[in-house]
Image (cartoon, rainbow, N blue to C red):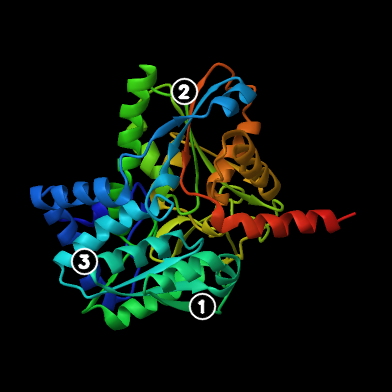
Amino acid sequence: MKNDISRYFYGPYGGRFVPETLIPALEEVEKAFFRYRNESGFKKELSTIFKYYVGRPTPLYFAKRLSQNYRARIYLKREDLCHTGSHKINNAVGQALLAKRLRKTRLIAETGAGQHGVATATVAAHFGFKCSIFMGTEDVRRQALNVYRMKLLGAQVREVDAGSKTLKDAINEAMRNWTETVLDTHYLFGSVLGPYPFPMIVRHFQSVIGEETRKQIRLIEKKDPDYVLACVGGGSNSIGIFSPFLSLPGIQLIGVEAGGIGKKLGLHAARFFHPEKGVFQGSLSYVLQQNGQIYRTHSIAAGLDYPSIGPEHALLHDLKKVKYDSVNDDEAVHGFKILSAMEGIIPALESSHAVGYLEKIKHEIINKLVVINLSGRGDKDCTSVIEHDDEKRKKP
């Protein structure tokens, strides 16, 4: 482990901008991560839980009818088949094992779409931790099924009725709670956001997605893909699948943000529509802001409804190693419906952004090999799509 603070950063992005009271806790987590990540006992326990509890490796599924529709060879990395229904369980298991070794007795987490909250509540039940999940009241409303699941799993759901009542406000409250409870509590951060070492830790545990994908596509197709697509909120599922492909030439990596209902500030959650740098919730990255004020965001997908992006994604954007683009709510719903109708797979609205992006590149991908990270399943989102369709019908 390096002795200087350069390890906190991805180029100019990242850092550890937190109250002094949290520095010892962050240092404790960092030391535990570096101590245990390559320890044989830790790796064996992690791989065993991945295999027998999470359901890894997840399949790389050839989407035959979707491929015929777009005249390409399209594969889906089926993270929706993980226990709890999304990729979030990968990181939750890894950090829970760290918390166990740190002798913590309580887990806390933030959640937007509820998938990370469910994953955290699940590992808390599995390992015997107490658990509190912080969730904005707007997300509680639109993700009622996941709220019930968290409570069923024994977690306390603490509703946050401040600000935009979404993910960023849930993170604020979780951070405040952690400052008061650091002795017995581990903050199981859910994305490649926040203060160092969380972006590094979450990336590490989610990189299993990309490592499996590369092995699987080479076994099936005898080559690497031409395109790899993933939705990007904070960026955990996307950095997870992108990670082994970043150093390889000739692969177009595309991160799909939430274009919402318009390009004006406040109508979307696409950080690169208005690229401004700022410090937000512990790290420096691109932030949707104006004159130093954080703007409200909008996305039909609660898990993408966030004003900043992971620091590594910010660097990859600047280096042009990943192309970042967006689809709007209507295009995401189209992705939701077309995958359901053509493959019998109902995707999360977050993942639907990546599926919906196929329409934008349909002329580019003819005869190409495409992999989409299907980061979660969409039962949780059916009510949101019904509401979206009802609103569309009301408009003249």
Q: Amino acid under label 1?
A: Val
Disc 3 to disc 2, how far (Cα)?
Answer: 39 Å
Q: Secondary structure at mark 1?
A: strand
N-terminal label among 3 and 1? 3
Could you say which quadrant of the image residue 302 lies in? bottom right
State the residue in front, 48 or 226.
Answer: 48
Answer left or right for 344 relative to 6: right
Q: Amino acid under label 3?
A: Ala
Residue at the disc numbered 2 = 226
Residue at the disc numbered 3 = 99
Answer left or right for 37 relative to 20: left
Could you say which quadrant of the image residue 140 lies in? bottom right
Report the mark closest to the observer, 3 or 2. 3
Within-10-Å neighbours for mark 1: few <14, some 14–19, many 20+: many
Residue at the disc numbered 1 = 160
x, y (%) of residue 373? 46, 39
Within-10-Å neighbours for mark 3: few <14, some 14–19, many 20+: many
Q: Residue at x 28, y 49 (%)?
A: 205
Within-10-Å neighbours for mark 2: few <14, some 14–19, many 20+: some
Q: Residue at x 38, y 79 (%)?
A: 176
x, y (%) of residue 208? 30, 42
Q: Is residue 89 visible?
A: yes
Is 107 placed above or below 51 here? below
Answer left or right for 235 relative to 244: right
N-terminal label among 3 and 2? 3
In the drawing, what numbered circle is on residue 211? none
